[in-house]
Amino acid sequence: MWNILGDGDLVVDQFQSAFLEDDGVLAWQEYALCAQTDPEAFFPEKGGSTREAKNVCALCEVRQECLEYALANDERFGIWGGLSERERRKLKRASG
C-alpha cells in the first residue's frame, strides 16, 4: 500500500481505524435497525408516508448517533434518526 500521508500510516490502516473498528466514527451503523429494513421506507416519494421509517427509528438503539451524523453531514434526503429533512432543518435552526 502507498504511504501517501508521509507519517508512517498506510491509507488502508487509517480507513480501517476510522470506519471499520468498533470505536470508529461510523461504527454505529452496524447496529442500525434500518440496515435490516427496506431502504425505500426511509426515502419516501414526496408526500409519501414516513410512518414505517419513523417506527423503526423509534426502536433503534443508535437513533441519536444517526441523527447527529445527519445533522453534521447536512443529509438532505430521507429519514435519519427518526426525523425528516424538514424536521432536521427546523431542529438545526432552533439550536442556533
Image (cartoon, grey):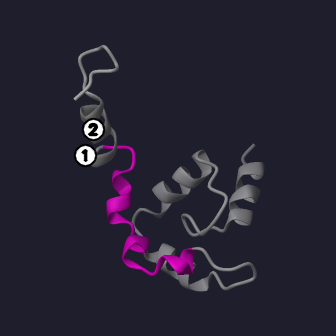
Q: Secondary structure at mark 1?
A: loop
* Amino acid type indicated by mark 1: Glu
Seen from the viewer's position, the closer of residues 92 and 44 is 44
Q: Quadrant of the C terminus?
A: top right
Is most of the magenta stretch helix, strand or loop? Answer: helix
Q: Pointer 1: residues within 10 angstroms few (<14), some, or many (20+)?
A: few
Q: Is residue 1 left or right of residue 48?
A: left
| Residue occupied by mark 1 | 21
Quarter of the image holding residue 84? Answer: bottom right
Residue 12 shown in magenta:
no
Q: Is residue 71 left or right of residue 59?
A: right
Kindly report the distance in space between the C-alpha atoms of the residues bearing marks 1 and 2: 6 Å
* Amino acid type indicated by mark 2: Ser
Numbered mark located on residue 17 in the image: 2
Residue 56, given in percent of the width and then of the height, sits at 48, 79
Residue 72, given in percent of the width and then of the height, sits at 58, 45
* Above-or-below relation of 85 to 14: below
Q: Which residues are magenta?
A: 24-42
Q: Pointer 2: residues within 10 angstroms few (<14), some, or many (20+)?
A: few
Residue 28 shown in magenta:
yes
Q: Is residue 46 left or right of residue 37?
A: right
* Above-or-below relation of 44 to 93: below
Seen from the viewer's position, the closer of residues 60 and 33 is 33
- Residue furthest front as drawn: 2
* Above-or-below relation of 74 to 11: below
Numbered mark located on residue 13 in the image: none
Q: Is residue 6 left or right of residue 44?
A: left
Does the CB distance between marks 1 and 2 fall below 8 Å? yes
